[in-house]
Amino acid sequence: MKISIFLLKDERRAFVQGLVLSLCVLVMGLALLALSGWFITAAAAAGMIGLGTLFNVFAPSAMVRFLALGRTAARYGERLTTHDATLRMLSNLRVRLLSGVLSSPYRQLERLRASVFLNRVTADIDALDGLALRLLLPGGAGLAVIVLTAGVVGMLVHPSVALGLLVGYGLVPTVIFILGQSYAKGPSRRTEAGMQALRSRIIDLITAREELVAFGQMQNAQTNVGKAAGYQSKGQAAVERGERQTGFWLELIGWAVVSLSLGIGASLTQSGEISPAQAAIGIFAALALSEVVAPVRRALSEIGKMQSAAKRIVPLVDGAAKPALAEPCDLSRASLACEALVARRGPGGHALFSPLSFHAEPGNTVALTGRSGCGKSTVLLIAAGQILPSSGRMSFGGRSPHQMATKVRTGGIAMVSQRHALVAGTVAENLRLVAPAASDAELWEVLEATELAQTVRTKGGLDARLAFRGAGLSGGEARRLVLARALLRRPDLLLLDEPTEGLDAPMAKSVLAGLRQVLPNAIILMAAHRPEEMAFADQVIPLVSTPAQNLR
């Protein structure tokens, strides 16, 4: 219900129009079939009793044409309106969803696998596109038409016929839908889970094919893909079986209602309470209402994945933070202060290091040292505003980075982690991710600073293409390209996690000197373990592990 309100509220006017048009389609269809039945029956009865010359055929035939053309036009308008509104609705949902993901805690984002998450989000959005088109609108319009039809039939034919229509098409399919959900949820969810596993395993098979071949695991990977395909196939077979069973029961109920209407109409006609033409109205109305309950079959087959998708999306949508206003802030002469900072591994966990304190002015370089796992990267993340300290304070320009508006923080702080992130495209496109308006001269400047200019020239210049995840560069070259991209931002605080990993000593010294040349006034805070990095720093601060950490 919550996701339904969110999805429909932004396009409620369009969906109301679509609901009205859906009602028009169903009402006109019912009226067309009922009128046609009455017309044929009344004309035949008039001919048999010798009144055929006095029977007016023009008004009913004109109404039949009007209803046929009107139904076609209303159907076209309904499809155009609701599908357009659904596309806009899903577009807004994607934006809100991604905003919610970006607002998630860093540690939560860190655990996401890109391929799995992307497949999951894509499938969830695709599942919800039928929420309005195949569940809410058909259900709402169908119930309204059933009640309306029963009322009209009660007035034109007989209340007993109307009661049969109301129970047969209103109450019984609703009970089938409610009970059918318990059966449909499981197979639908299994089908979706199988599809996601199949997609993820195929992507892993393609992206890691070289490693799989090298370690002799290609056959195992192919077997896992086959298992996922089999699991998905079994789930899909169960969904289709349930859909067929639902369709059978709906057909059976439809013919039962038609038979009931026929029996009641024949009985009332023999007793003289209604005419044969009136009885025909009830029979043809019962035939026409079968179209109204048809969407129950499709909705039952998809309700499971719709509910699963909604459960996953609602927390992310609720977590979407409203963009904070970017307050004017000059960080060019800001200092970085750390006061009794403590970070813990999870709530209630042991401190990673003893309370940390230091102060850095513009142009200073601070190197954090210590054994692996002692919390150096965590301090960088705190300085980047991505996580909060357990106690103590980290401030840049007098304010906590976490409390800065996103635009201010990303404009003044840049971080290069151990995992480089490059995309398929040209060297220039990878660099301009952070500065779309940067000139070629600026790109070459940062490439020169990171000792990468000559390498890029030999590969074809700024237009040299890189493959998926920057394939085409060595590990050290890819890392330097990421460093160059960070320099292009011209940050006031540059955070580096072991920036010279994979470089020889002369190259490491040259790259560090290039960083300082491009950013003479920036504060550089780095997690360091190499002598070249510590020699480059103005302050070397060892992180002292707590006793509990030492025991581990």
Image (cartoon, helix red, strand yellow):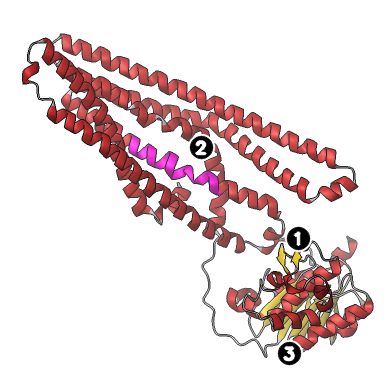
| Rendering quarter of residue 253 | top left
Front one among 316 and 441: 441
Front one among 28 and 60: 60
Residue labelled with disc 3? 521
Residue labelled with disc 2? 303
In three-dimensional space, the C-alpha distance between marks 3 and 2, rounded to whole angstroms, equals 58 Å
Q: Position of residue 130 (x, y in %)?
A: 47, 43
Q: Residue at x 26, y 19 (%)?
A: 283
Image side of residue 276 versus residue 305, left or right? left
Secondary structure, magenta segment, majority class: helix
Q: Which quadrant does the C terminus fall into?
A: bottom right
Q: Is residue 530 visible?
A: yes
Which element type, helix, strand or loop, lies under badge 2?
helix
User: Which residues fall within the magenta stretch?
Assistant: 125-142
106 is higher (above) or lower (below) than 278: below
Label 2 vs label 1, nearer the camera: 1
Q: Position of residue 434 (x, y in %)?
A: 66, 74
Instruction: Say whether disc 3 or disc 2 marks the residue closer to the N-terminus.
Output: 2
Kind of residue at badge 2: Ile
Q: Is residue 158 visible?
A: no
Q: Residues within 10 Å of mark 2 (few under 14, many from 20)?
A: many
Label 3 vs label 1, nearer the camera: 1
Image side of residue 50 versus residue 291, left or right? left
Which element type, helix, strand or loop, lies under badge 3?
loop
Q: Residue at x 29, y 37 (%)?
A: 71
Disc ID at residue 467: 1
Residue 21 part of the magenta-drawn span: no
